[in-house]
Image: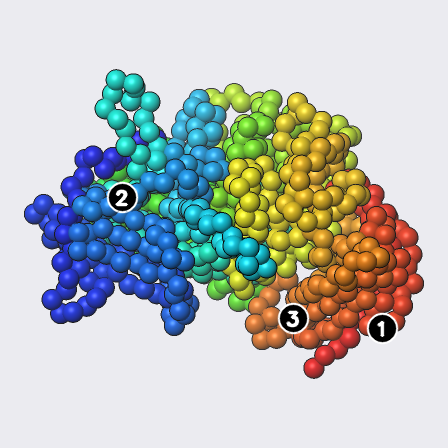
Amino acid sequence: MNHATIDTPANFAFASRADEDKAGDAGLRTLQIGRAKLSLHLSAAGDNVFRVQLTGKRWPDGNPSCAQLTSAEFAGRPSSATCRIAPDASLNLELAGHTILEGSSGQTFGLNGAKWLLSLTYDPACRYFGLGGKNLGFELSEQRGLFWNTDGQADASAFTSRQALATAQDSSFPVLIIRKPLPQAPAAASNKQQAAPARAVWIGLVINSSYPSFINTGAGDNRFGPASTPFERRLYVGAVDGEPDVYLVADETAAGLIRKLQALQGRMERPPLWALGHHQSRSASRSYDDLDRLAREFESRGIPNDGLWLDIDYMEDFRVFTINKKYFWNPPEQVEELRKRGFQVVPVLQPGLRRDPTYIEYQEAVAKNLLCKTPEGQPFVGFACPGYAVFPDFALSAARRFWTDRVTQFARLGFAGFWLDANAPASGSVPLEDMLFNQGKLNHGSWHNQYALALAEATRQGLLNAHPDRRPFVLSRSAFLSMSRQAATWNGQPLATDSQLAGSIASALNLSVSGMPFNGPAILGGASAGDSSDGDRLRRWYQATFLFPLLRNHSQSSSSGAMGANDSVASTDADPWNRDRKTIAAITAFIRSRYKLMPYLYNVFLEQETAGDPILRPLWYHCDEDWTLAAADSYTLGRDLLHAPLLSGKHTSHRVQLPAGRWFSFCDGRWLSGGSHLVKPGTSTPLFGRVGSVLPLRAGLPTDSRTDLRTIDLLILAEATGRDAAALTFTASYLADDGHSFAYRSGAQSGLCLSLSIERDTIRLETRQEETGYGLIQFRLLLPVASAVRKLYLNGEKQPLKREILPLVGRKLAVYASPTSPASLSY
């Protein structure tokens, strides 16, 4: 399928009239488009969230989407926005006294056969983001895209896979985010003390269609020249089939909008702590001995690591849910032995079942009629790692139960998580259009994009059945709307190049704001050959992504069954120690820094669970300044850390733009003001902390994966104030739990609240522990020496301060440290 070609409004017929419902339903309209009569339902969910749905005979199968979108949370909340469908079938969305989105008369709702389109007025002043899964860059003006999950490796031959990797789209999140500037009236002299009006509003469109959907943000066509008819830029969304279902969401802030989009798709439950660690994956890893060798390397070098991943070679002849006894002769005992050493074993699962009459899963799937069919009614056969493969029909509840039952049995061997690959779905060189769903009643397009979502849900449920007291972890290559409820996703496997590294940041940010917060690329893109042998490049990949929600090193190998027998791609493992000393030292420092920051990272994940804030955030999320709209090479982790990595090996310095305020530079220990700064990070990275924040850190030097969230250091980022300056006050909070169970739901978590005041060179800090379900939180207080703070009072008592070194991002930062203290209790 060609991702660059989408439908044009010129081929659609549009409704020119929207008649009111005769029964008086204000939200119901009848549209007449040619000879087609459609029912349009506009509903207001509350809190500036609206839904437009159309039904009609054009779509006999309705809308087969299984995305779990819910607007129940918004019910009862007041709306400051209004959305109307006019009698001329135009659409108007207003907020803050301004029309922020509109479709013109007779050019808004269009049909072309089963295809539908919602066309809106294009505003060149708007800026566009989102479209999660599309590798189109960071800001998305004048772009077009078709959403069709594609596995660049599994759907391509070995000869073409290298090129395909650069453009493959593994996920489909048809979510468009629009920033619309508002007209600014000159401020009256008498109003100088009043808050400035909003500079812009934010709009979100969510297309709930499992069919291939498309979005155009004013893209043109290079065939139009000076002598051509004038080209009309349009903003439009649509799908190739299925009943239209579009959510329109508005807010006066970027953060407010993204939280609503996340609530609509589902905020992510807190993951197991080990899922946030470093993961090592090699396509050639297939045995206990392979994993044990990796574990010993991590242990002997003092490099923390949580996950050891198995690719398809661990299976018996690539039969899913089997283990080759030559590689694991006692799986439960061996998996448990690694777990006790701090390593979780994560096997791959693929939906393609080997077509083999001796294979029990194949036998059962055939006997129970659980497989996708061809138009002739026989099981669809594609090409996958097992060779000839058949695929469970996840449109059937029985097929989902079948998969869940198999995962349950398999997970009881000791596995706490799985990764799902080739689940676009992928069938090699076999055309997918012959792969039908729901016993052959639904065409392939109706379920293609959501196949991975159903697979992930069934896999997650299997893990919960096997380990009811453990939080499950599923990582999926492909994804669709509401996947945040089921799994994390990795952003495909881009090539190990500087441009692909930069593109990975843009892709991760747009996925994050599209409703998929737990994401990240494979380190070095899973590439093989000469690309991954470059130590400088491997350092830059770790430097740029060590704070991403997912940190997973995956290297390809020609010895793996993932490649054909005649493939001749050289292999160079991207293991952290398989390089020169400089690279090994730098990578070790970045991995340890991630674990040092683990308590902070975990609490950012808790913000996602409670409020819906992304883990990675574009700079415009907290800073509404025009320059942030093009800041594609920087991001914040939560609110308090800003990272602007060096992405090219051609440069040793990096110009960084910081938002207004004061920022602490971890790469050189200086305080900087907002604005442009030239930074020379060396083997470190440009990482900055926001003034007025408290960063919870893991105590001691992290050399393994064992993080106790009850024993922490609190790094206070605050400067001494001037003699005549007012005192600076701020608050902070921290939560801790066991990191692996659901006991927090019944109160087994501990909460720490902090109130700080800084005046001249003195900090006064009051702490209280308001929750104690997970025990007392022990902490030390750390102050950067560069902050010029010399006195610290904790709950009224002056604290002795000792100077020491804090190793972080490859630097040794001078800090003052207090003794360890428990928080005061508050009941």
3 vs 1, front mark: 1
Q: Residue at x 28, y 32 (%)?
A: 232
Residue 675 visible in the picture: yes
Mark 1 element type: loop
Say left or right for 477 vs 641. left
Q: Disc 1 marks which residue?
A: 796
Pick out the residue farthest to the front.
189
Mark 3 element type: loop
Q: Quadrant of residue 810?
A: top right
Residue 689 visible in the picture: no
Q: Disc 3 marks which residue?
A: 749
Question: Quick one: quadrant of the C terminus?
Answer: bottom right
Q: Position of residue 159 (x, y in %)?
A: 44, 22
Q: Residue at x 26, y 52 (%)?
A: 91
The disc label shown at residue 119, or none: 2
Tell me which amino acid carries mark 3. Answer: Gln
Q: Residue at x 33, y 29 (%)?
A: 220
Q: Position of residue 429 (x, y in %)?
A: 34, 30
Tell me which amino acid carries mark 2. Answer: Ser
Pick out the residue farthest to the left.
35
